[in-house]
Amino acid sequence: MSNRKAPLQAGEITAGGRSFLLRMGEEDLGEVYPGMVRYSVELWEGERMLSAFRTNSFEYAPTMAYGAKDVAERTFARWERDLAADPQGFLEGITTLESAPVHVPPGPPAVVVIQGSPRPGGNCSLLASWVADEAQRQGKDVQVVFPHDMDIHPCIGCYQCYNTGTCIYEDDMTSVLAAASGCRLLVVCTPVYTNTVPAGTKALLDRFQALHASRTLDQSQVINASGTLGRLPPIKAKGVLMSVAGRRGKENFTCVSRVVGAFFSLLGIGAEGPILLDGMDEIRDVRTIPGLEERVRESVRNALKRDQK
Ligand SMILES: Cc1cc2nc3c(=O)[nH]c(=O)nc-3n(C[C@H](O)[C@H](O)[C@H](O)COP(=O)(O)O)c2cc1C
């Protein structure tokens, strides 16, 4: 996805009887976002990359007096100076590939269900329970995620995940990303709140940006600067949206469909046909809708069947 160019700067440093190579590089990430450029400063000893600093142009707000290239150049100069002056002190102070903890997710579940309503026992909970039960009947492991019961910090748009493939926040999202990145079916059950998804669910969807970002790094670039989560594989799941709205009319799902559609497409998830239930203010309980439970179960079976082909 990235387009690495020849190094902008390189310098050999001999210090403490050891020989190092310091390199500053530039990658064009224009395929990811228009104009995005990532700079890296890498410290090598022979064939081994000891440490890396990365910064990208999207991290810097328009009012800032400096940009990614300036910061990378200053980092290069500082590393060059400090390494030559005190190699041992410098190497002790940096995050090395060996010292950074790599998160190895346990066997991910085949099916992840995001139960996006803050209301326990509500209609989305019922939909999610039918999905989970049917997936288990089909012999699949299932994880149901309740964003409103979890510690999920909203994305702050720092764009640092495009340097490391990980988020700067280490919270409950770490385990959600690990589960979702390996799953085969991702079902989002969400009510319509003010035309879109509830706030906690939106926070969770936004934080998936880190998975998108991790796709801009190849394995040789992986270094856990944040020390939280190893780079995760891209999602190969199918996605299904199930949504309920109080008002009557399918137009009430316009925004939710776009939000969840954008979420699926950001991650390269192929969307299956949605189940959209309007008029819930009057209906009150999805269990009273004739044939609905079977429709939900069939949609799960079909998505899992298509996955096996
Ligand atoms: C804060 C809030 C905002 C809502 N906004 C909308 C809306 O914009 N359009 C709509 O059709 N229903 C709206 N509703 C109704 C919910 O979509 C409806 O009650 C739904 O069944 C709740 O899902 P649940 O039973 O899974 O909690 C809103 C409800 C709440 C609490």
Image (cartoon, rainbow, N blue to C red):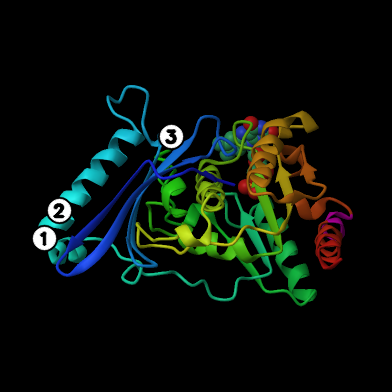
Nearer-the-camera pick, 244 or 261: 261
Residue appearing at x 64%, y 49% in the figure: 267
State the residue at coordinates (27%, 24%).
65
Secondary structure category for the residue under label 2? helix
Q: Is residue 285 visible?
A: no
Q: Distance between the residues labelled 3 and 2?
A: 28 Å
Q: Residue 82 carries which label?
A: 2
**Sequence-wise, which precedes: disc 1 or disc 3?**
3
Mark 3: which secondary structure? Answer: helix
Tell me the element at label 1.
loop
The x and y percentages for residue 276 are: 78, 43
Would you identify the image quadrant in which residue 254 lies?
A: top right
How far apart marks 1 and 2 lie (CA) works out to 6 Å
Q: What residue type is labelled 3?
A: Phe
- The location of residue 4, given as percent across then percent down, is 50, 45
Alpha carbons under labels 1 and 3: distance apart: 33 Å
Visible residue check, residue 226: yes
**Residue at label 3?**
58
